[in-house]
Amino acid sequence: MLFRSRAILRIGAYELLWRDDIPDAVAVSEAVALATELSTDESSSFVNGLLGRILELKPRLALGSDPA
């Protein structure tokens, strides 16, 4: 189940940091919904907390071009 949480976090972080067409709240909400449905009981809280922290740090991160 941990591989699912990691994949969800990767998608959520990508959407937060490099996809300007996706609102930040939507990226976090969708990732939490996926974690709730596809992973363990604690995963949704973990995903929410980690993506929330990334969102707080986003203005201070020096981001390059889209990694995709």
Image: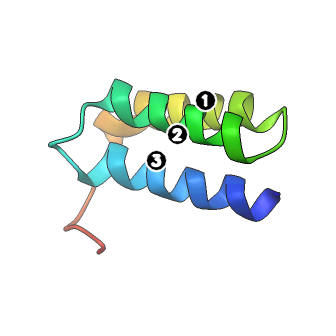
Residue at the image position 59 percent from the left and 41 percent from the top: 34
Hey, what amino acid is under mark 1?
Answer: Asn
In primary-sequence order, the first of circles 3 and 2 is 3
Residue annotated with mark 3: 12
- Determine the image quadrant of residue 35: top right
Q: Disc 1 or disc 2, which is closer to the eye?
A: 2
Quadrant housing the N terminus? bottom right
Q: Which mark is residue 31?
A: 2
Q: Which mark is residue 18?
A: none
Hey, what amino acid is under mark 3?
Answer: Gly
Residue annotated with mark 1: 48
Q: Disc 3 or disc 2, which is closer to the eye?
A: 2
Residue at the image position 35 percent from the left and 29 percent from the top: 26
Query: Label 1: few (<14), some or many (≥20) within 10 Å?
Result: many
Closest to the observer: 17 or 35? 35
Q: Are marks 3 and 2 in contact (CB under 8 Å)?
A: yes
Hey, what amino acid is under mark 2?
Answer: Ala
Relative to 7, does residue 28 appear above or below in the rendering? Answer: above
Label 1, label 2: how far apart the Cα atoms are: 8 Å
Q: Are marks 1 and 2 in contact (CB under 8 Å)?
A: yes
